[in-house]
Image: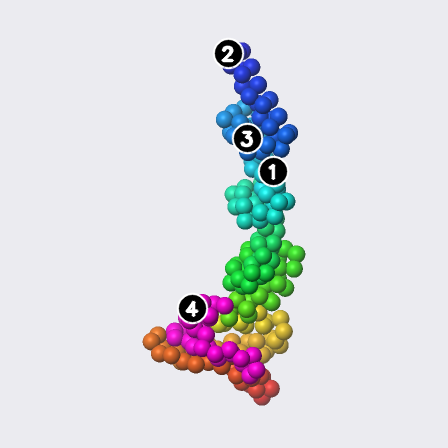
Amino acid sequence: EDSAEMVTACRYGLAMEAYDSADYDQAGKLFAELGDYQNSADMVLECRYQTANSVFAAGEYDKALTIFAELGDYADSAEMACQCNYYLAEEAIAEEDYLQARNYLEAAQGWKDSVRLLKEVSGKAFMQYLQENGKLTYVNTEPGYTVTVTAADDVTVILDYVFDSRSESVHMDQYVTTKLVLGEAKAAVSGSGTTYINLLGMISESEERVAG
């Protein structure tokens, strides 16, 4: 019995040596094999946490995000996951993958200036959505965007992507009224029909309503 205890103690010592040497993968495996011996269970989590920090420091944010997400509320894992999402969003923006950037920025939960970036990216994400789904028929920022809407749900997508990104710069009365204009368009679109919508034309119409 004493011999077994000594063997376990030695294995624990080896696990601590691996941890102190920053060999977190090996240390984690050894601690896991020790079960509930001393603080081995806690050290398994700590090894995972330190592994995540290491890959984060190396700029491997996708790998770090996976581990931090698995760790849940351990230490500051939740905050670190937000940071990973933020930096992954920056990478996506650099690659002009605005739809993915939008997803990452939403998951960043307000970390750093993610709210501001989300508003900047939303319009581009919307245009990318239209292009990838074959709904974009014509683009000209002067005088406006013209898109093809083939179902009522598509108008909801327009609502979510475009006007969420405009809400900071558009007067609230105009913003709400513009939503009403789109709501009318949504009601007019049939499931099988095709409707052409000039978005900026709708905004102009909403401005006239507000002014009136």
For the C terminus, the image quarter is bottom right
**To which residue does mark 2 refer?**
1
Residue 89 x/y as whole percent: 58, 57
Asked if the stretch drawn in magenta spans residue 135, the answer is yes
Residue 11 x/y as whole percent: 55, 21
**To which residue does mark 4 refer?**
133
Crowding at dot 4, Cα within 10 Å, few <14 / some 14-19 / many 20+, comes out as few
Do the residues bearing badges 4 and 1 touch, measured as CB atoms within 8 Å?
no
Residue visible at 52% across and 83% down in the picture: 201
- The magenta segment is 128-155
Q: Looking at numbered disc 2 in the image, what kind of residue is underneath it?
A: Glu
Task: Report the mark closest to the observer, 3 or 1.
Answer: 3
SS class, disc 3: helix
Crowding at dot 3, Cα within 10 Å, few <14 / some 14-19 / many 20+, comes out as some
Task: Report the mark closest to the observer, 2 or 4.
Answer: 4
Q: Is residue 135 visible?
A: yes
